[in-house]
Image (cartoon, rainbow, N blue to C red):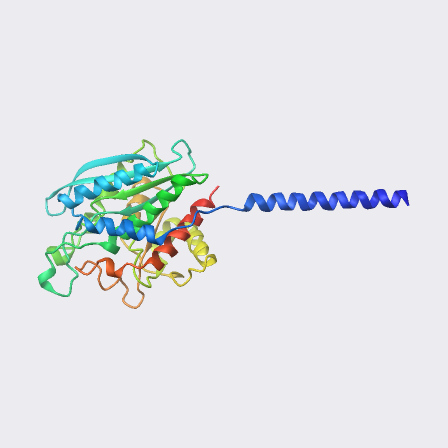
Amino acid sequence: MRKIFIILLAVSQLVSCNKAAQQSKTEEKVVVVPGFSSDSAYSYIQKQVDFGARVPNTVAHDECAKYLSAKLRSFGAEVVEQNANLNAFDGTVLKSVNIIGSYNVKTENRVVLFSHWDSRPWADNDPNPKNHKKPVMAANDGASGVGVLLEMARLIHKNEPTIGVDIVFLDSEDYGQSEAVGGQANEDSWCLGTQYWAANPHVQGYRARYGILLDMVGGKQATFYREQASEYYAGSVVSTVWSQAKSLGFGQYFVDEKGGAITDDHIYVNKIIGIPCIDIIQYDPNTGGFAKYWHTVNDTMENVDKNTLFAVGTTLMHVIYNEK
């Protein structure tokens, strides 16, 4: 009986140890992800719009730049303002500023998040020709991505992830030449702030594991397809983001199907600095383009939806906080 008891005790201890090991392993896998507030993100978008159209060389642009820098500093980021005079296609010198907020600055394992913050100076896609020379308020096309990233900065400040995070607000993205503003469309006339940052990063020799660009991420019932340049340069990152969104119940926003190929800031991040970067951008397969208010005077707060902001912000928070 004593032998049987000893054997049973040994088995019991072994089972207990295995359970403890499994429990410890399970506890290690649990990651606490701060809850994303769409109300907060929405308020940051509203604040940008309240300045007016953030067109380079305007008072609204300058005041918004000060706000963005101050906000990142208030959220504990190490902030760099990268000022540059950039030449637009029409000869205009754009007084531009890329604004970078960094967390865990000494950590080499980094992820970089982008959004442009400027407004297009012409509503050249507006159905009313009388509006073509009016600036775009850019609530969705610009401010929505910035609003999401500001909310992420607020949360990161309270509870930093294990990796380093750089948030980059890119300037002079939307001053590009299209046929509607005269001459032949010129792709490289867009994304000027990105081209400058990629060639002159805020930290010498800067590297990140990957980048994620947000563009038009606040529209009502917006859909984000797998953009093809993103697939080409960083397909594994696309899969990670879209899989995370699906697991969180946001599959109706992050549609796991092929989308179009778009010239956007991520192209120059990939080509110039060589950081694999994807683009989360609204895409309508029925029109092969963006929302009907894109580059019109109607890109206003009425088109920004908190549910979409929540889906995008929550997905990105889970992606970032699950990185090792």
Which residue is painted at 33% across and 42% down in the image?
167
What residue is rendered at 21% in x and 51% in y?
49
Residue closer to the observer: 176 or 307: 307
For this rendering, which residue is in front, 172 or 270? 172
Q: In the rendered image of this protein, does residue 104 appear above or below residue 147?
A: above
Image position, residue 271 (x, y; %): 31, 44
Q: Position of residue 147 (x, y in %)?
A: 30, 49
Position of residue 20 in the picture relative to residue 245 (left or right): right
Query: Which residue is located at x 23 percent, y 41 percent?
Result: 67
**Can I make out residue 45 in this image?**
yes
Q: Is residue 90 left or right of residue 11?
A: left
Q: Quadrant of residue 284?
A: bottom left
Q: Position of residue 256 (x, y in %)?
A: 41, 61
Which residue ends up furthest to the bottom in the rendered image?
Answer: 286
| Left or right of 306 in this view: 177 | left
* Observer able to see residue 267: no
